[in-house]
Image (tube, rainbow, N blue to C red):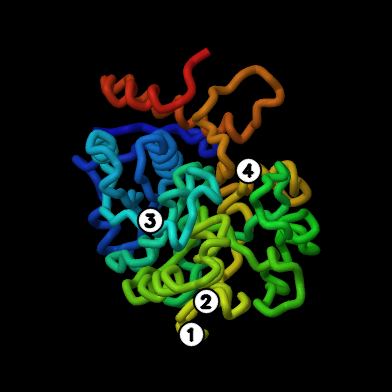
Amino acid sequence: MYIPVICEDLGGTLNALSSTDCPFAFCHSAMGSRAYMTLLSRTSYLAGTLVLYHSLMATKPKYPFVVAVTDTLPQDAQETLKRFGIELVTVDLLILPASRFDPSKTEARFTDIWTKVRVFALEQFEKVVFLDSDMIVRRNMDEIFDLPITSNQVAAVHACACNPRKIPHYPKDWVPENCGYSQANYPDCLSTQPLQPNTPVPRPYHLLNSGMFLCRPSVELFNRMKKMLDTSPLVHTWKFCDQDLIGTFFGGGGEAPEGWGEITKEELGDQWMPLPYYYNALKTLRYIHSSFWKDDEIRAIHYILSDKPWFDRPTDDPSYEEPKRWWWKFYDSLISTLEESGRKDDVALLESLVGPKV
């Protein structure tokens, strides 16, 4: 069955193929098992996952979209994904014991986010571009797969350390003057004078955001990361869970040694490769760092923080964020095509997971 998707940027209707007529098996062999991937462990993020898929397919990617699922995701949600022709891979939930990490010290939505680290063990894939399920893709970004990362490295964008909402549990050094995006001549500086791990600049300059990353998975790599997670005495201080682990492991040795746990410097990952903001355009950058943000440059936008776009529908209120409207355009397109195909059950399920109509 064909599920047509609309991409306003491309100005047309594309055909995304389902499992009954799908080229993904070809992609896996001819393209070296490269894949876009997200993680889904609960139904509350199912709408986000399907809108991410819908937006990605509108850009005509060369590579398939795969969802890593845990057994905490209900079977009906998994069947819904399969009806879209989406390939699933099952991973075990990764929850740290309370003696290692107290989830009450961070946001509830992060309780099972450590599971994202299991993506690094999926060595059936040569390369993976991981995307959080609270993102949409606005332009084709296949070129990212060709970046020359090593087997011991990730590519990612900087974290924004401005903390515009003054969230109290965020690190104290997360202030605008310490933000990596506050570097002079950003983003040109990424190619002309990339930061080295021991450069004497504010600590947040070296931090990445793990909402999108490129990696080359292997069990051996995962085992070293898991060793750090199991032994680092600083895990209980990590506010952003997997992001802190990935940033510390691939920090190029720039983190204080006590954060490494029982792994040696030789076991650490290589220094992470910084990418321009537009591969993981944090929604807050649009107004915090408006000097370099351009709507038409955005490859993928990331709806960070707790107010996800599917919580409330667009209104005529000028204060309603424009990037949220982008998400809802893809959602409305998805619902329309499902209705045209007579998939009433899928429509009902998705409508139950988003903000009510007003």
Q: Amino acid at mark 1?
A: Thr
For residue 112, side relative to residue 21 (left or right)? right
Q: Residue at x 39, y 59 (%)?
A: 97
Disc marking residue 264:
1
Looking at the picture, how far across and down is residue 99, in whole percent?
A: 44, 61
Q: What's the distance in space between the residues labelled 3 and 2, CA to CA?
A: 19 Å
Q: Residues within 10 Å of mark 1 (few under 14, many from 20)?
A: few
Q: Residue at x 57, y 44 (%)?
A: 304
Task: Tell me: residue 87, above or below residue 193.
Answer: above
For residue 305, side relative to residue 103 (left or right)? right
Give the mark toward the camera: 3 or 1.
Answer: 3
Q: What's the distance in space between the residues labelled 3 and 1, CA to CA?
A: 24 Å
Q: Mark 4 or mark 3, which has the lower sequence index?
A: 3
Disc marking residue 283:
4
What residue is pinned by disc 3? 95
Q: Are marks 1 and 2 in contact (CB under 8 Å)?
A: yes
